[in-house]
């Protein structure tokens, strides 16, 4: 810039003087012009020397701020003649320790990264690894990466039982679903994420969520209690896969239990609804050559989802006395085909509460759970399967009052099996067809709360890499809400239950899931 300005200034001065000379012809004017020409020659010589000095002090164009974990060490031991001037040393030090590079800045967007982080259907409990891989891929070059997601729905539901709709993508309560037919134009969820690179090895993540259809707030979906914005996740991540396969995180996050994914474009499996965890805790992970190991110490008491352990007979989360461990391996089968297999264990699932069952009640003792899962990606096909179960019976699955007391307490389990085919239609992205079946088992054989089955047929298309258009046809059998599933519903006799084995629901839904 300095060189350009100086040359431009000198050129403009010379042009103006030349123009003036053309207009004047007397000897006095010629003498003055000659004197000015000498001064211009001196100015150009000074300008040339100044440019040579600036170029000798400046770093080469396009040189990166840092080239790896050892760049700071190499700079600090470079010969004195090649040391960077003090102001640039400060800028380079700042870049090394705050995650900037030659193409990065302070605030930016990464829409595909935001879609992956906010997607509720795939990689749902794998967010820390997604962040680490995004760092490697150059998607998080800015100090702060902002993004958001929005999912809107139009659907029609029909049930054979008054006010009992079994589709779990919204809370199955009479507050919002009256009669035997339901139709909606709604916001299912809206979210915002902020990812901050505090340094090359320390990253912060915040996620705000608005989800009126699945909120635990009271009232209808237009009640203010269900229209709150919550801090869904927040944690600090320590790690950099370019330096070490180990990483760690502390905060509020998904727990490493099970796969919890679905091949459906929108509807989660019953396995996700039954066992996907969200809790306060500390996570340690290891990822290398397809092997991924995670262990998380989980805050005790009743957590946000799927975890509960007793703290001196209460649900007060005042001790870290719960944990979850997951290990999986992804095998490369060649030609971009992969096979993932894994298993998980948690010390305290949520299925430890006594009769009558109510979310977040204290437990007398913990009830562990385990999960096994797999996913095959072969060409245009994706197949996945998962099974999760508690190791002990769920005390609350038994109603001690006749006539329901004939049904014994049982282990709680869920399994899912699904497949997806990506059809090439000659467009920018394929048209995906999917089918998935999942079952949630919560009661003894023959009990009204024995199980709830779900079939989902899906169709989806990515209009852009971060805008998914989808449609689904869903059928459910059984109506088994977790609260008071075996009886004890307020306003009903203690020896009856509002669960219904013969209840069926059919749903047609279309929607848009987009991120920026």
Image (tube, rainbow, N blue to C red):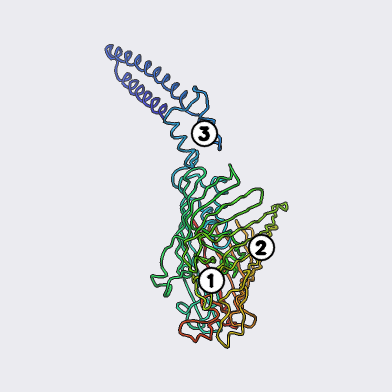
Residue under the point 56% across and 35% down = 70
Q: CA distance from mark 3 to mark 2?
A: 43 Å
Q: Secondary structure at mark 2?
A: strand
Which tag, 2 or 1, sits closer to the chain's start?
A: 1
CB atoms of marks 1 and 3 within 8 Å = no
Closer-to-camera residue (136/14): 136
User: Quadrant of the rendered structure where residue 306 is?
Assistant: bottom right
Residue under the point 69% across and 57% down = 339
Query: Looking at the image, is 14 positioned above or below residue 262?
Result: above
Closer-to-camera residue (483/136): 483
Position of residue 459 measured from the top left corner of the image (x, y, whole percent):
60, 67
Q: Which residue is mark 3?
A: 72
Instruction: Name the image quarter holding the N terminus.
Output: top left
CB atoms of marks 2 and 1 within 8 Å = no
Q: Which residue is mark 1?
A: 364
Q: Which residue is mark 2?
A: 373
């Amino acid at each position: 810039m300095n060189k350009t300005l100086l040359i431009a200034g000198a050129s403009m001065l010379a042009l103006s003087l030349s123009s003036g000379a053309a207009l004047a012809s007397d000897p006095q004017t010629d003498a003055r012009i000659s004197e000015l020409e000498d001064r211009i020659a001196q100015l150009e010589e000074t300008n040339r020397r100044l440019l040579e000095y600036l170029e000798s002090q400046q770093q080469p164009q396009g040189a990166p701020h840092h080239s790896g974990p050892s760049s700071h060490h190499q700079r600090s031991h470079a010969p004195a003649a090649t040391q960077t001037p003090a102001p640039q040393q400060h800028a380079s030090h700042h870049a090394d320790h705050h995650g900037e590079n030659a193409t990065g800045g302070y605030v930016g967007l990464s829409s595909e990264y935001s879609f992956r982080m906010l997607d509720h259907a795939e990689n749902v409990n794998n967010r820390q690894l997604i962040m680490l891989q995004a760092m490697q891929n150059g998607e998080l070059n800015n100090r702060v990466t902002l993004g958001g997601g929005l999912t809107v729905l139009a659907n029609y539901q029909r049930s054979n039982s008054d006010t009992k709709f079994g589709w779990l993508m919204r809370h199955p309560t009479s507050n919002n679903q009256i009669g035997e037919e339901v139709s909606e134009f709604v916001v299912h969820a809206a979210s915002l994420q902020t990812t901050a690179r505090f340094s090359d090895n320390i990253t912060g993540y915040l996620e705000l969520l608005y989800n009126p259809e699945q909120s635990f707030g009271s009232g209808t979906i237009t009640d203010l209690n269900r229209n709150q914005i919550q801090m869904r996740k927040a944690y600090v991540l320590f790690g950099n896969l370019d330096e070490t396969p180990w990483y760690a995180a502390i905060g509020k996050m998904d727990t490493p239990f099970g796969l919890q994914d679905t091949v459906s474009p929108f509807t989660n499996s019953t396995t996700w609804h039954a066992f996907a965890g969200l809790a306060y805790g500390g996570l340690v992970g290891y990822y290398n050559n397809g092997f991924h190991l995670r262990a998380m110490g989980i805050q005790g008491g009743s957590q946000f989802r799927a975890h509960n352990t007793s703290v001196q007979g209460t649900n007060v989360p005042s001790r870290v006395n719960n944990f979850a461990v997951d290990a999986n391996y992804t095998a490369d089968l060649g030609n971009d085909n992969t096979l993932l297999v894994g298993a998980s264990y948690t010390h305290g699932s949520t299925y430890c509460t006594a009769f009558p069952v109510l979310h977040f009640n204290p437990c007398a003792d913990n009830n562990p759970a385990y999960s096994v899962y797999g996913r095959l990606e072969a060409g245009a096909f994706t197949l996945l399967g998962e099974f999760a179960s508690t190791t002990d019976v769920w005390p609350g699955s038994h109603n001690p009052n006749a006539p329901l007391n004939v049904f014994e307490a049982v282990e709680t389990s869920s399994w899912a099996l699904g497949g997806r085919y990506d059809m090439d239609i000659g467009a920018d992205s394929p048209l995906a067809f999917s089918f998935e079946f999942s079952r949630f088992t919560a009661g003894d054989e023959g009990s009204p709360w024995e199980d709830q089955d779900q079939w989902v047929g899906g169709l989806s298309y990515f209009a852009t890499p971060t805008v998914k258009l989808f449609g689904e046809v869903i059928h459910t059998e059984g109506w088994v809400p977790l609260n008071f599933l075996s009886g004890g519903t307020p306003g009903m006799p203690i020896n009856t239950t509002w669960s219904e084995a013969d209840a069926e629901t059919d749903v047609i839904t279309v929607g848009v899931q987009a991120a920026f």
